[in-house]
Image (tube, rainbow, N blue to C red):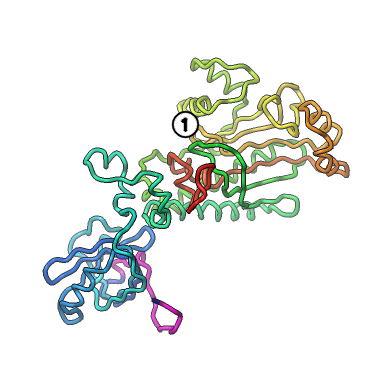
Amino acid sequence: MIQSQEKPDRVLVRIKDLTVEKADEVVWVRGRIHTSRAKGKQCFLVLRQQQFNIQALVAVGQHASKQMVKFAANINKESIVDVEGVVRKAHQKIGGCTQQDVELHVQRIYVVSLAEPRLPLQLDDAVRPEVEGEEDGRATVNQDTRLDNRVIDLRTSTSQAIFCLQSGICQLFRETLIRKGFVEIQTPKIISVFRAEDSNTHRHLTEFVGLDIEMAFNYHYHEVVDEIADTLVQIFKGLQERFQTEIQTVNKQFPCEPFKFLEPTLRLEYREAVAMLREAGVEMGDEEDLSTPNEKLLGRLVKEKYDTDFYILDKYPLAVRPFYTMPDPVNPKNSNSYDMFMRGEEILSGAQRIHDPQLLTERAQHHGIDLEKIKAYIDSFRFGAPPHAGGGIGLERVTMLYLGLHNVRQTSMFPRDPKRLTP
C-alpha cells in the first residue's frame, strides 16, 4: 500500500509506448493483472493499462526464483502491480494483446494494490460481443450487471475507449469555438444538466453533460444554425483524425458503420421531411410532430438519399414548439426553429428566441401561461435585447450515436435515470 512515504527516482513507462523501438531497454511499468498463466518454470502475465495491454514473462533464471514465479502466478486478477523488466522483441505476433510485437521479461514485481480474489464480473466476458457469445455459448455481461458493478466495467478496453473519445469531443468543442472567436455574449458552455423527466428510454438520462451554444446574430438565425452545424462537423472530423484507435476498439465489441456527414451539412425543411415520410407510407399531418419511430425512419430515408448520418431539420411547425420560439415571417404556421439529427435520432433542438417583449407576451398568452410566473423573463427583454438563437447537445447521446451504440448508459460514466441512483 502506497502511503506517500517515499519518492523513488523511477520513471513509469506507459504500456501503449512499449514498442519495438524500446527493444532491450529496462523499463518500469505499472498495470493491472489482466490474466495469469503458469507453465512449468514460467508464468505468463497480461498487464493492462486503459485499453492497452502487453504480455509479461516471469521465468526462473538470473532474476527470478521458483518462489517469484509462483508469487506472480498467484496475484489476483485486477491487482495493480509495478514491474521492472526488459522489453524484448517477440518472435511472432502476440495475439490478444495490443502490443503484439514486444513482450516484457520481468526482473522485479511488486503488488501496489491487491484486488479481492472473487470479481463481480470478468472483464473478458464484459468485452465479448453479445452475438459472438450467443454463437459459442460463452458468457456475456448484461447491462444491469455492468451498471451495478460500474467501477469494474469502466476498466474494460471498450469503456476506456468510449470515455477517451468522449473527452475528445469536449476538447474539440472548446478548440473549435475558441478558434471561431466566441467571446462576450457568445457563450459556449460545458455544463451538468438535470432533468426531472420520467423518461425510461435508451437515449434519456436525468443527469447528463450539456454542450450549449447561445449566440447573438445579425440578420438571420441561420447564422447560428450554420455555426453550430460547423462546430459539430469539426468535432466529427477531429474524432476521425485523432481517435481511430478508440473507434476501432469499440467496434470490436460493437460493430458499426463509420459515421458519415456532409460539408456543408445537409439542411431540409420540415415540409420536405413530411413529404419523404408520406412517400414511404407514413400518414401524418403538416403540423404534427415527429414520433420516435418516424425520426428513425426519416434517418434511414435521408441516409439512402443523401448518404449522410448527420442533418438539420428546419422550419418546424409553430404549434409543436415552446412559446418563446420566433414565428416564421412568411408562414405563420411555421417557426424559426430546427433540430439536428445523428443516425436518425435528435441530438439538438434549437430556435430563434423571441426578443421582443410584446410578441413574447402574446405568445405566452396563446399558450395559456401565467404571465406573472414569467414576468422576470419577459422583463429581461425590455431593455434592448439582441436577436439570438442557440441550442445544446447531450454529450453522452452524441457519443452513443457517433459510435453507433445502442444505449446512452454505455456512454455515461455513472448513469442516473428514474430507476437508478447508484453506484
Left or right: residue 18 compared with residue 273: left
Instruction: Give me the residue at 63% from left, 18% from top.
Output: 286
Q: What secondary structure is marked by label 1? A: loop
Outermost residue toward the right? 383
Vertically, is 177 above or below 387?
below
Left or right: residue 318 compared with residue 133: right
Instruction: Give me the residue at 72% from left, 54% from top.
Output: 183
In terms of depth relative to the viewer, which is nearer, 236 or 120? 120
In terms of depth relative to the viewer, which is nearer, 238 or 400? 400
Whether residue 12 appears in magenta in the rendering, the answer is yes
Q: Quadrant of the N terminus?
A: bottom left
What's under tag 1, amino acid-wise? Asp
Span of residues in magenta: 2-21
In terms of depth relative to the viewer, which is nearer, 192 or 344? 192
Quadrant hosting residue 8:
bottom left
Q: Name the spot of residue 312 as percent of width and height, x first.
A: 59, 33
Vertically, is 289 above or below 1?
above
Q: Name the spot of residue 304 as percent of width and height, x first.
A: 45, 26
Q: Name the spot of residue 227 as percent of width and height, x first.
A: 64, 43
The residue carrying pointer 1 sits among few (fewer than 14), some (14 to 19) or many (20 or more) residues within 10 Å by Cα, namely: few
Left or right: residue 291 compared with residue 300: right
Whether residue 335 appears in magenta in the rendering, the answer is no
Quadrant hosting residue 354:
top right
Vertically, is 344 above or below 46?
above
Q: Name the spot of residue 105 as percent of width and height, x first.
A: 23, 72
Residue receiving disc 1: 307
Instruction: Give me the residue at 32% from left, 74% from top.
Output: 111
Q: Magenta: predominant secondary structure element? A: loop
Quadrant hosting residue 79:
bottom left
